[in-house]
Image (cartoon, rainbow, N blue to C red):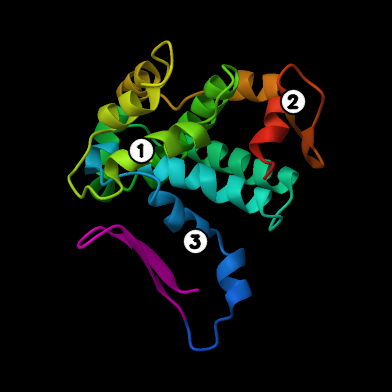
Amino acid sequence: LGFAMVRRGGGHAAAFMVGRDSRLETLRSSWVTWHELSHLQLPALPPRDAWLYEGLATYYQEVLQARLGIQSQARAWTQLLDGFDRGERSPADGTLAEASEGLFESGAFSRVYWAGTVFGLEADVALRSRGGSLDRAIAGAARRWRDDLRLYSSAEVCAAWDQPLSAQVLRPLRDRYARRVDFPDASRLLGRLGIATTPSGVELREAELSALRDAIMTR
């Protein structure tokens, strides 16, 4: 698999550039496939919201591979924690929304992508703790923009995800993330999920939310 990107003109689509000798299994086992297809869960968003659309795609590229048996649950969490570490080491300049808007000028890709991925995890855990899930929120709102090519904002998207709930959950979380200057600290949440880093790698332990952790990665 050489390269892939989402195309919005004329409809929502993902375009893949592949070599003559590429095989279906190569396409299936590449994170690029699941990242680009995951973008299609959202409508078109402006550059200022790159942290949301790239973060959600990065979150699901690991989750979907675990659910489909392409990688183990432990491997998926390892990939996510490695990304969080890279994001935390990325220089911060302005808010997350500002870094997203000037992404190609600043080169703050690690910060923008992985801060958005922490948002995806935190949002999924918050919804699952209420008996729902990020999957369900995305599916419930998808019909709003399935045939709509206009530009949405992250605030509109999160408000749509919140609509079936009895309280606002994702919109306030979105507001906090967009204004963040520091990289989000996921350590407490990871501890509650029973995800620990040891000298031999990531270890999955019994914890307060370990059943929820396993549900995230289960088909």
Task: Depth check: give the residue in front, 46 or 69.
Answer: 69
Q: Amino acid at mark 3?
A: Val
In the picture of the structure, the residue carrying the numbered disc 1 is 51
Can the viewer see residue 212?
yes
Determine the CA span between mark 2 and mark 1. Answer: 27 Å
Determine the CA span between mark 3 and mark 2. Answer: 28 Å
Q: Is residue 197 above or below residue 107?
A: above
Which callout, 3 or 1, points at the residue further toward the start of the chain? 3
Image location (x, y in percent) of residue 196: 74, 29
Label 3 Cα crowd, 10 Å radius (few <14 / some 14-19 / many 20+):
many
Task: Indicate yes or no whether the magenta region holds residue 8.
Answer: yes
Can the viewer see residue 94?
no
Task: Depth check: give the residue in front, 196 or 13.
Answer: 13
- Which residue is located at x 22 percent, y 42 percent? 46
- Which residue is located at x 61 percent, y 21 percent? 189
Query: Which residue lies most toward the bottom here?
Result: 20
Looking at the rendered structure, the number of numbered marks drawn on it comes to 3
Magenta stretch bounds? 1-18
Q: Amino acid at mark 2?
A: Ser
Task: Depth check: give the residue in front, 184 or 8.
Answer: 8
Image location (x, y in percent) of residue 212: 68, 27
In the picture of the structure, the residue carrying the numbered disc 3 is 32
In the picture of the structure, the residue carrying the numbered disc 2 is 210
**In the image, 27: left or right of 168?**
right
